[in-house]
Amino acid sequence: MDKIYNIKYVDASYSYEESINQTKLDLFEAYGYVEKNKNNIVITFIKKHGISEEKQNHDKEVNIINGLVIPDTSLASISSAYKTNILDNIKINYAVSVTWRDVVHVENLPRYDCSVMYTEGILVKIESDYVILKDPKTIRTYPTPVKNHPGSGLPTYLVIPISFITDIEVVK
Amino acid sequence: MKKLLVKDSDENVIVDVIFRADDNNEYECVGVLVEENDNLIEVAFNSKNGEIVDSINIKRADIISINVLDSSKIEKLT
């Protein structure tokens, strides 16, 4: 956890505009203390000073004061080159349900894994590295309790990196 | 304390800062030094399309130590 990294990653995003002109995924760049936790990357921006590296790595009750947990597939190079056949039978204007892993901003919590989201909406765009859903209705299914997401307002569009998607199905 | 930001330089100054917070605990952070004046420094952790989205202001009086890191030695995950 004491290793310092420069990280470039992509993230999902909501839009509240009537139309969307997204042409590429937003690119984030962060500096932090990094550790891998299975298929999650934990980026700590602020940590308590004086806690041993061993305790930080093995005691998952240690709070991250400020940081992020991102899917390992959110790294910019992995996202842009990501290959999947998950969208093979999915077409534009289908009503779909999408299960996807989301970036988590952590403050004062012992949190070391990403959230899981479930979204229903109309698929309006498929690009090489992202999809766009119109009128998305999203719930966070992990961790419990299940919650509506985002917490406030009704987004008109949701942009999801394809590398975040773990399942997509046509809604009958 | 000596100023670390070089005006008109495009090079990021990456710092590791140990500081004392209002709760009297000591914390450590790393990031890009984006602002400094006689009273405080601002360290940015995260940017979106080049715009800062997450940073902290630290009072100079609360700084215990500050180290400038050699950016060429920082590992990259991109």
Image: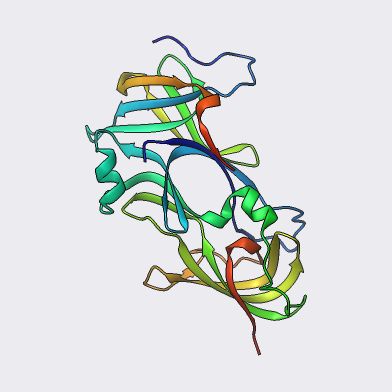
Q: Is residue A67 left or right of residue A162?
A: left
Q: Is residue B75 left or right of residue A24?
A: left
State whether residue B53 appears in this view.
no
Identify the residue shown where x is 25% and y is 38%: A52
Residue B60 coordinates in the image, percent (x, y): 36, 19
Q: Where the N terminus of chain A falls, by quadrant?
A: top left
Number of marks in picture:
0
The answer to whether B11 is drawn above or below residue A46 in the figure is above
Residue A165 coordinates in the image, percent (x, y): 59, 67
The answer to whether A95 is drawn above or below residue A75 in the figure is below
Q: Quadrant of residue A84?
A: bottom right
The answer to whether B46 is drawn above or below residue B69 in the figure is below
Residue furthest out toward the bottom: A172
State whether residue A60 appears in this view.
yes
Q: Quadrant of residue A114?
A: bottom left
Q: Is residue A114 left or right of residue A172?
A: left
Nearer to us in this view, A21 or A162: A162
Residue B41 coordinates in the image, percent (x, y): 44, 23
Q: Quadrant of residue B48?
A: top right
Nearer to us in this view, B15 or B69: B69
Identify the residue shown where x is 51% and y is 34%: B75
Residue A135 coordinates in the image, percent (x, y): 66, 72
Identify the residue shown where x is 46% and y is 16%: B37
Nearer to us in this view, A23 or A91: A91
Q: Where the C terminus of chain A falls, by quadrant?
A: bottom right
The answer to whether A67 is drawn above or below residue A159 in the figure is above
Q: Is residue A105 left or right of residue A20?
A: left
Residue furthest out toward the top: B2
Residue furthest out toward the left: B24
